[in-house]
Amino acid sequence: MTDKLKLKGDFTLPGEAGYEDLTLELAERWGADAIRDSDGTVLSDKIIKADYPIYSTICLIRADNEWAKANRDKLQQNYLMSDPVIAEKETVEIDLLKGFFREQFEVNANDDPKSWWQAFDRTTGEEVDKKDWIFDPANGTVAIKNVQKWHKYTVNFLAYRIWEGISMYNHITNDWGDQEHQMPIDPIYPAAQQAMLNYLKKWLDEHPRTKVVRFTSLFYNFAWFWGDPSIQKFRYADWGSYEMTVSPRAMKLFAEAKGYEMTSEDFVNNGAYCSSHNVPSERLWDWMDFMNEFVVSFGRKCIDMIHDAGKAAYMFYDDHWVGTEPWGKRFTDLNFDGLIKCVFNAFEARLCAGVQGVKTKELRLHPYLFPTGLKGEPTFMEGGDPALDAKRFWANIRRGLLRAPIDRIGLGGYLHLVQDFPDFVDAIEHITNEFRTLKQFHADGAPYTAPLKVVVLTAWGKWRSWDYVGHFIPGVEIYEVTESLAGLPVDVSFISFRDILEQGVPEGIDVIINAGKVGSAWCGGEHWKNAKVIEAVTEYVAKGGGFIGIGEPSAIKHSSQYFQLAHLMGVDREIGATMCNVKLPVAASKKHFILEDLEGEINFGKDIDNIITLEKDTDVLIEKNGSPQIAINWFGKGKAIYLSGFKFAPENSRLLHRALFAAAGKEPEYSAWTCSNVRTDCAYYPKNKKLVVISGSDDPEMTTVFMADGKSIDVNLEPHGIQIYDV
Amino acid sequence: MTDKLKLKGDFTLPGEAGYEDLTLELAERWGADAIRDSDGTVLSDKIIKADYPIYSTICLIRADNEWAKANRDKLQQNYLMSDPVIAEKETVEIDLLKGFFREQFEVNANDDPKSWWQAFDRTTGEEVDKKDWIFDPANGTVAIKNVQKWHKYTVNFLAYRIWEGISMYNHITNDWGDQEHQMPIDPIYPAAQQAMLNYLKKWLDEHPRTKVVRFTSLFYNFAWFWGDPSIQKFRYADWGSYEMTVSPRAMKLFAEAKGYEMTSEDFVNNGAYCSSHNVPSERLWDWMDFMNEFVVSFGRKCIDMIHDAGKAAYMFYDDHWVGTEPWGKRFTDLNFDGLIKCVFNAFEARLCAGVQGVKTKELRLHPYLFPTGLKGEPTFMEGGDPALDAKRFWANIRRGLLRAPIDRIGLGGYLHLVQDFPDFVDAIEHITNEFRTLKQFHADGAPYTAPLKVVVLTAWGKWRSWDYVGHFIPGVEIYEVTESLAGLPVDVSFISFRDILEQGVPEGIDVIINAGKVGSAWCGGEHWKNAKVIEAVTEYVAKGGGFIGIGEPSAIKHSSQYFQLAHLMGVDREIGATMCNVKLPVAASKKHFILEDLEGEINFGKDIDNIITLEKDTDVLIEKNGSPQIAINWFGKGKAIYLSGFKFAPENSRLLHRALFAAAGKEPEYSAWTCSNVRTDCAYYPKNKKLVVISGSDDPEMTTVFMADGKSIDVNLEPHGIQIYDV
């Protein structure tokens, strides 16, 4: 019954000079229709002249190191908070770069510190009067006088980055020795823009065979501050935040555009910086909007030049993507032809697939062709099993690909490493064929999606759809939840509190999800003190809407409740203020529509404890040590479901899948095109009447697929297997 | 070597009519020198006329029910917060007593609600304009108009208590049937005072044989709100809080005395009330001071009358003690002769022993002579083992008695129940003899106490020394810690943040302990935002002081740190704001002075996770999942020790004992008069050269006692055993 479709194309192969025969052989075997270079590899003439379109990588901000060296005042910069110093006498001296990597950072002594820096008493949280501190450029120190004895002092200062982060990482990781450090220049300066355009023009002339110019990526890297290596290699890393876009010139332009000035503390934020996990302030939104406009505007000039040269422009959606905002309103204006995302998980596939305004979406699969993985584990070396890695990653990603179309896939790294791993070569051959089959099904028509619209409510909303702020962080509820959602046959989108304040809860929504820890951007933080938000969500549920709260939904210490939607969920959390209030007894009923298919105990990982029920008729399904883990509460015509945590796992994804239908009051519509076995998923493509059944399991699995007409099919699946039926 | 001391006296026996022979036989066997009645028992003439001093109980506020019935407007009252109601249209109607026990409460319709009540929008936290609500006395409801749809509304209202809590509990628990409900009258009214004095006068005349009048106790019970029995029996209980002292008259007198008015919300506090776990506001301190002055002033009149009748006055330090404040500055003014505390644990023995201004301190031992214990477990009935219970409780309490003197012990309940439990009778005989021996040693001279002064810093300070706010609540760090401290040979006292602000850290302190969860009164809550507190504690440590932080010491979300003393401890807690800041690696060293004597793994119970180290040289001794459980950090000449939690257990008490010496930098002075086996304790009484060694274990134990001269003694102890040596 399985289709044995075999197509060609839609695959990007990393070529490698010195291994021309291997390159061309695997290009044939894997059906490649494009060959790329990688950071640290070059393509030989033999490869370039073979009949394959060539992808070439370019990173304009670090491309011309001569220009950078001649224009050190135009290097990129960022604010750092110095390590705190406790005042032991009347003055404090602070060595600004102490604890940071001095090969990455250099104090900016060009722009007047008194205009751009701030010193803080972090004991009180108050800024130190600018008269009371002085910068010593020779020593890179700040002396603060008139301090309060025993208080803690820090300085927010500007530092140039004198080594570009991604090349620094590759240099150090791959031991490139005394190769010159590449420095990042900042296109905020017109002279730097001109230099970059000049470089690009020349580069385009010199790469006539290149068909696709792959930016890795545009101008500003994700925030990545390194530490003094004798203490700690890394200090701060966030794949989505804007710390590395800052400069006095940008701040001046911002003030002109927005009518007010940003301060260093807007970015330093008590040393927590503006991490994606923290709720963005209105000021930060303005800054991001400003930088997004700038990046898109100058980016478009570069892309136009590429198009004028008859080439396509692709963007790598991992490094230096900050400011492009693929889910923002201006991304279309960049006019990119393609977007490439490196993926481990289904949510990343959805992240890439969902971007508007770009024709070709490509996934870079793991494992990369490197000896070790990102965490240093063996891959293409003794002890590694890259074929199994590839199958497992693919099984994760495929859940997302069943739901949303992607145009291309590919690999990266050093091709010669696959020579010792023939089962990896086989595995990729299978994967490429599966991919092309699924792509064709999507091309024929969209898969069946249940009539169930889910929105995930976060402080970021659409701007951080599928929560791309870094790699999957286990235990952060939003990641665990979106990874589950990424493979479910429901309609998923992301909204922000700003959206709700501006337009209310959108029409036609069946379920709102709010998940996360108190104070996080995912949960919503201070937004939950806004009565307008409470009104909107409460009215929506009262009128029949569904709500699923996970972890600490709607949590903030405010007034008489901790969960500000406690009245909807029928539960709240004891955080110590009501220790003497006697709690209602909890009796778990353990039987419910959403618990069907579950075999063992619920495991939400490290979930939230001390949950209390507020109403006698709150229905607790599962409890742990007297604290509800799953509770259901009616409110008006609607329903709210509380989950004390969430961990991506087959049984939990199923639980969430059913909970969505229960919250929406659409239980009868659940079963169409679902599987009995939680370790399997399926998708039905009505246009061509294809049913695809997949397994994410390392073992053989049996499953029954329930079709829309009430009939069912029993299916056997190999480990990580796929079966395709005409139904 | 063990002394076989056998003394008489210092023991109070509960007599029981109908069991005269048993009463007198056990009085002889246990060496009783006083016989008491109990709630629900009477003493027969035969007992009264035997040659024993008689203790008689009296509770003036519920003694004269006829007067109470005739003066229902002078019953005691309190504020309640109604259960929240969500506005679904333009008006909201709230049934005030819904969810409360209507046999305990009656809405006060006498005092103008508009003067004394408040309605709140609990969604915003704002008070509703008084024009917008109206009370309907006929239905006991409040109607609120002009509400914000979907907001949550509550009303703070005054309720009379129409059934006195302690007699209500005894009535219901012991099934007293249709016996009339006793109502509590409020001595704030001069007429009630006069009625109480009249009653007392008459009562004294009618009880010529009574030698000791035992108050159970004075006027205001601990806060105890009961619920609608169809939902939950209890709603709120706090053994130390002042909710049940409130009345319009008291509030008017307060305003006259203090110059400002309290509001209902000062007591209701968002429905959390003013539980002892919450940081008291300055307004609450004023209220407590005002009530304390009143209770002492009128209490003294009653006690003077008793003294004039030639009798002694004792107070039961459990029920109706609110306002007396045995650790406050006015307790001496009450002129009580004795204080009786019901005890399970060592900290309660210390609580009683430490009170100033009263001559006789007596402990009421557990188990009470009731068929079941406080949690309903079998005691004097089939399945119970009251002898073992008695030995275990005694072993707990005895740790405290080694350190601090108590004058008497006794039992309560129904004496006839012991008839079927001869081993219980034996156990009590042993206990009474041990008690008298220890009392005699204390009388000869104080035991050796190490030269180490510890203060426990809480928002309550001395006022809640030994943290008496209820029974031991497992998991609340402060209880676990004080129970350990109660048996250690060090000098322990309690100070508040107000003390530090007024006088700084007291001279001569070796170690400050701060223990608890963020926001709790034990930790300190908002006090940690006060820079003066940070300055004082930091300077103290810099100059050589020791600090031990347990759980979330000095925690509050403020400025750049969560633990406001993070700079002292070298650790802080990740609460989500700095998720993207890379943490220092944690490597536990596992060897240290404070870990000696430890056999297995550390178990602090449910301790605090996500602890991070801030300094490379913070010394982590034990970690769990990468989160330090024990860390030591030098600051200036002093040292801070962080413990992620605490649970009272022999090995943890030892760890704390050693940690105190380590924090103080007095390790060399640790060993004098300590035991090798953590399940044993000892005390040395230098005046009479007696060494007492005790075991808290259910098994036989061997231990080595290290004496001050470096010599040691090996000791064998029976389960819960004691050995006494002349050394």
Image (spheres, coloured by chain):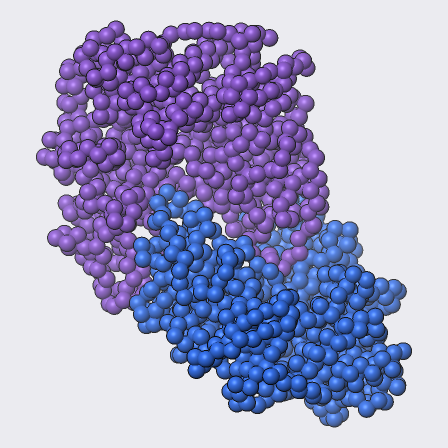
Chain colours: A blue, B purple
Q: Quadrant of residue B62?
A: top left
Task: Estimate the x, y position of residue A10 in percent, counting from the top left.
Answer: 70, 85
Residue A431 appears in the picture as rendered: yes
Number of marks in the image? Answer: 0
Query: Which residue shows up at 77% across the image and 88% down it?
Result: A53
Q: Observer-nearest residue: A81 or A339?
A: A339
Q: Observer-nearest residue: B253 or B299?
A: B299
Task: Estimate the x, y position of residue A177 in percent, counting from the top left.
Answer: 87, 64
Task: Estimate the x, y position of residue A516 in percent, counting from the top left.
Answer: 51, 61
Query: Which residue shows up at 49% across the image and 54% down it?
Result: A608
Query: Which residue shows up at 55% across the image and 56% down it?
Result: A605
Quarter that holds the N terminus of chain A: bottom right
Whether residue B521 is situated above or below residue B658 in the rendered picture: below
Query: Which residue shows up at 28% across the image and 13% down it?
Result: B22
Whether residue B93 is situated above or below residue A668 in the rendered picture: above
Q: Observer-nearest residue: A241 or A89?
A: A241
Residue A465 appears in the picture as rendered: no
Q: Quadrant of residue A50?
A: bottom right
Whether residue B610 is situated above or below residue A349 in the rendered picture: above
Left or right: A27 as drawn, with respect to A593: right
Task: Estimate the x, y position of residue B645 in percent, counting from the top left.
Answer: 55, 40
Q: Quadrant of residue B631?
A: top right
Left or right: B137 as drawn, with respect to A492: left
